[in-house]
Image: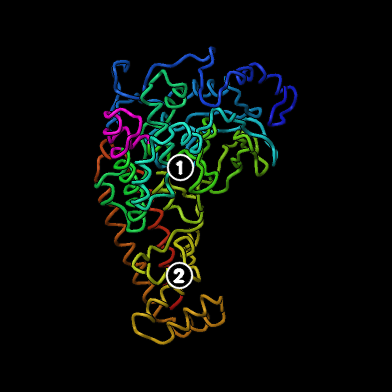
Amino acid sequence: MEFPLGLPAVVALALAATAVHVSAFQSSSLARPPSVQPSPLTLCGMSTMSPGASSSNGLLLRDERDVQPMVDWCLGYGAQTAPGVQVAPGIAGKAGHSIRDNRENYGVKTAQAIPKGGPVLFIPAQLVLSSSNIQQEFGGSLDQSENLLAQYGASDRLPLFRIMVKILAEYEKLDQSPYFPWLNALPRTFYNGVSMTDACFACLPPYVAYLASMERDNYGYFFQALNAGNVPLRPDTISNDDIVRWAYNVALTRHQVVVPAVEKTIAPLADMINHGTYPNVEISYDGEGNCIVTAIRDIPAESQLTISLGDASNPTPLFATYGFLDDDCPGVFCKALDHQEEMQELKYDFTELLFGTEAGEIGTRVWNLFLYKLLKDNNDPNAQALLTAVRNKDSSTTKQLNQQYFQYTHQALLQHVDGIIALVDELTARASSYDVRTHPRVPVIVAHNNLVRDTFAKVQAQLYQMVQ
């Protein structure tokens, strides 16, 4: 028997017992292997729920995710792991600020060292949720909803919509779904912008509130399109905001991008790998759609396995989308949302306008942005000179202009930094007044605000030193 990961023969023999189930796979269906028994239903408040279930986001759920049956299910269908690789509870990773306790928190670690380029996980294609396969499965029944999403300007999110519909379809089957062990292992509560309440938004600085509101708006488009279309789901499912929001969050936070706006996938088991500022593994797919996780650096024993979920230079987009705080990030956005028009003219992105978290370093582009804003507002002809210099990457001219107007740009930056610090202090005080039992997202909001505040305080100190 050939193993796609190329694992050592002794490992391959050890895995052979689970791999025998692969031959039972069909491209259009998935049957539960006889050796894997369903666990008690915990995904919804139905008659199979046991007493003591708790409410989270309107869904009746048990307190703990049922993860080990999902691992057994994946292995039973031919998933493979390198020696020592295991799913473990209590791994905070970069989600440490977003989880109330370790019962909700899982990750993947390795008890043995893995060399760079070494295999980590193999998930067969038949287990993978693929947006293109889902589109074929549902045929034209999604067309009406997807046409409406296109009218909303959300055409690039159609692959995500298809995955969400598939999750809802499997959710309706409950423990009769072949994906039940995976569904039953998923998070119960999310901490991202889609899940935030108005009370949460009242505690967010402008930039993260802007990004979080965009995510919430996108969910609103999905919910409207789902209810306006002829999707093959029960009315009580598509009208239930809590269930649809949960499915949307699963699709949003656990997918892997294959081709942006064309193909998205979720590979059960691989989706348990947390984000890291300096990831040590990467996820790829072969020509047959199998998911392969490979080490991209030497990984010592007893290490957590991590992937990159986005730009590590700025934690706020990750917080808004995924609901965790990456507190190892090298920088945070300078928060100059009132300079967006100037950003577009200079062709600058949010991720390029950073303050350093280590020592409060101020990026060159930040100086350029604030100077350009000042020159424009004062109808100074040098505004065009700066714009041309930036677009032509003429660093000598931009440096000369920054020196010429330093005292004015410095004053504008200091005023901006002072204002953000005062605002964040006010927002954090408001968040800290909430009861975490009714506002579970308070810890991650406060942690994010504190990271911003600490960084801006360092920038403030740098600015004061410049004029001493």
Residue farthest toward the bottom in the current orientation of the protein: 381
Name the residue that disc number 2 marks.
Answer: 366
Query: What amino acid does circle 2 point to?
Result: Val
Residue toward you, 398 or 443: 398
For label 2, the SS is: helix
Q: Main secondary structure of the magenta part?
A: helix
Q: Is residue 109 left or right of residue 408?
A: right
Find residue 234 and report its image quarter: top left
Range shown magenta: 227-247
Q: Residue at x 56, y 27 (%)?
A: 126
Q: Is residue 426 left or right of residue 14?
A: left
Residue farthest toward the front in the current orientation of the protein: 140
Q: Is residue 462 above or below residue 98?
A: below
Name the residue that disc number 1 marks.
Answer: 159
Does residue 419 appear in this view?
A: yes
Does residue 449 appear in this view?
A: no
For label 1, the SS is: helix
Q: Position of residue 375 (x, y in %)?
A: 39, 81
Disc number placed over residue 344 in the picture, else none = none
Q: Residues within 10 Å of mark 1 (few under 14, many from 20)?
A: many
Of circles 2 and 1, which is in front? Answer: 1
User: For residue 209: magenta?
Assistant: no
